[in-house]
Structures are given as C-alpha cells and as structure tokens.
Amino acid sequence: MSRLDAMKDQYKESTSPKPVKQSNKFDENNYFATFLADGVNSAQRQIRIVEPKGATESPFITIFGHKKQVEGKWRTFICAKHEKGEACPFCEARELLLAQGDDVSRKESVQYSAKKMYVVKVIDRDNPEHGVKFWRFNHHYKNAGTWDKINAAFGVLPKDEDPFSSENGRDIVVTISRDGQNSVVTGINFNMSQTPLSEDAKQADEWRADERTWESVYSVKPYDYNELIVRGAVPAWKKNPSGEGGKWVDKASLDAVASEPTEEHDSELTIGSNEVQTINTPKSATPSTESAKVESEDEDDDLPF
C-alpha cells in the first residue's frame, strides 16, 4: 500500500461516523431480585446461572457493603475500603466507636460494619430478552441463607455434574415467601432436567461473552456521598454556579435555602451504574415511614433502584 493509500484510509477513518459509545446508564433490567411487592406473599421464579469463562472459576463473586436506612428505606452501599482499598466513612465510624471501648459504643458500631454479599450473573427465564442480570444476595451468618441453600442443593446432583454448564446445566427454581416476621425468605432447588443455557447457540455465546462485572451495575459511591449517609443525611448534588461540576450536600440544606417555587435539586439514591444517576425529588416529598430490620442474616435485599 502506498503512502497515498494510507492517507486515504486515514481520511476515511477520520471522517466516517463513529458508533455512539454506550454509557453505563442505570437500567432496572440489569438486576434480578427476590423482592415481593406489598400485598404479595409468595412467588416462584426460574433462573439460570451463566457459566463463567474459566473452567475452575466460581460464578459467585464475594463483595462487602454497608446497610443504612435512608428516607425510610434500607439501602446498600458498597464498601470502598474492602473493594477499592480507599477510605470508607462507614468503616471510620465503626473504628471510632470501637476505640471508645465501652459496651454501648461497641454495640452501636455493629450498624457500620461491612456485610458480606454475593453477586452472580443469571438469565431470568421469565424475561430472557433482558439478557444477563446480576443477582446480589446477603451472606447468612447462621448458615441458612440463599448461599447455603444453593450449596445444599448440590447434594442432590451427581458428583461429576456441572450445573452451570452452558450445554447441559440446570436452571434454578427460586421460591420466594414471607416468614412470620414479614421478612422475605427464599427456597432453592435445581430443575429436574438438564438443558442448554439457550436453544440458540449464538445467544448462549453472547450471554457468556458479557464482559460486565458487578462494578458495572453496583457502584462504589464517593467518600463525600457516603459521609452524608453515615451522618443520617440524604445526599443531593449541588451544581456550581457556573453549571460545571458541583458537590454532594445535605438535601435538607438545599430545602432550607431554596427560594424559587419551581426550583428542584437532584437526590441520588440509586445504586446502579458507576455513572452518576439522579432522580428528581420534589421539595414537598414526605419521607417514607416504612420500617425494616437490618441484620446480616436478612434474606431480602433492597432493590437497586
């Protein structure tokens, strides 16, 4: 190829329309959750765990997060210290309380402890058009949680069988119900039949080729954001007067100084992608009074939206 040809190719490349880069925006279809709406006491769903690429790789990823009630709802905040090696306001609060040495402070410190969780990629058989979803569930420190039930279900399968195989693996039937305390609990059973991940080999390959990790859908929030959560505030993004950049502040402070009746601010309470996601919260909104317990043994997790 001549230099002229090279130049023409370069020109063609530089003037050709570039594909629009897909930003990592929040999409509720990225998540599978064992959540029951108000008034619903039970449900059954079928999923398939996506086979990992490595022959000896577990499909389950362990992560750590903190639980905190915000505006009446329990939320999960990924631990920056455990997952990024960065400063974490939750962990700092825990360490300060433990340093005081008294029983009351030690008991209070528990609420700031990082909780172990698991994330796995699945296909929701009721909604296969959604593609690969991420299922996050809590570790159960009494060994009676979803993780324990999945492992117990292996006991009924032949020892040499791989239930995660794309060719002849098994779907999982997830039974969801409420217990006597109105908490959501799950039952886990492998499907009796061995089936492929998809009858369409190309579709199965696409699902397995999904390069996203848990960080693609569960973001690690910035220090300033989490510090507000620890203080009991609701984070809101305050733009600089220039319109470029800004900072996280207490939503209450914006409400107090707002002067324009139509002015709104952005309150960020999603736990989706790494890209900042905001939801408009009217000033007249009343915080929910919904109560919930926060224990490391909880089966039900907050929704990621």
Image (spheres, rainbow, N blue to C red):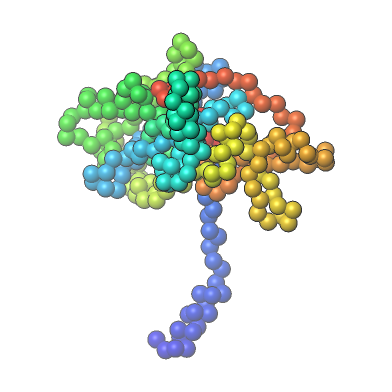
Whole-percent x, y for residue 125 in the image: 41, 34
- Residue toward you, 240 or 40: 240
- Residue toward you, 104 or 162: 104
Q: State whether residue 28 is above or below residue 183.
A: below
Question: Does residue 139 appear left or right of residue 8 in this picture?
Answer: left
- Residue toward you, 71 or 52: 71
Q: Could you tell me which residue is drawn at 79 percent across and 39 percent down?
A: 258
Whole-percent x, y for residue 135 in the image: 42, 35
Question: Does residue 28 appear left or right of residue 281 in this picture?
Answer: left
Q: State whether residue 183 is above or below residue 131.
A: above
Q: Could you tell me which residue is drawn at 41 percent across and 31 percent down?
A: 115
Whole-percent x, y for residue 51 in the image: 31, 42
Question: Does residue 57 appear left or right of residue 219 in this picture?
Answer: left
- Residue toward you, 208 or 119: 119
Q: Quadrant of the N terminus?
A: bottom left
Asked if residue 111 shows in the view, the reply is yes
Whole-percent x, y for residue 269 in the image: 59, 37
Q: Quadrant of the C terminus?
A: top right
The picture quadrant where one finds residue 252 is top right
Q: Could you tell me which residue is drawn at 45 percent across and 33 percent down?
A: 95
Asked if residue 44 shows in the view, the reply is no
Check the image and name the residue furthest to the right.
260
Q: Could you tell me which residue is drawn at 41 percent across and 43 percent down?
A: 83
- The count of marks equals 0
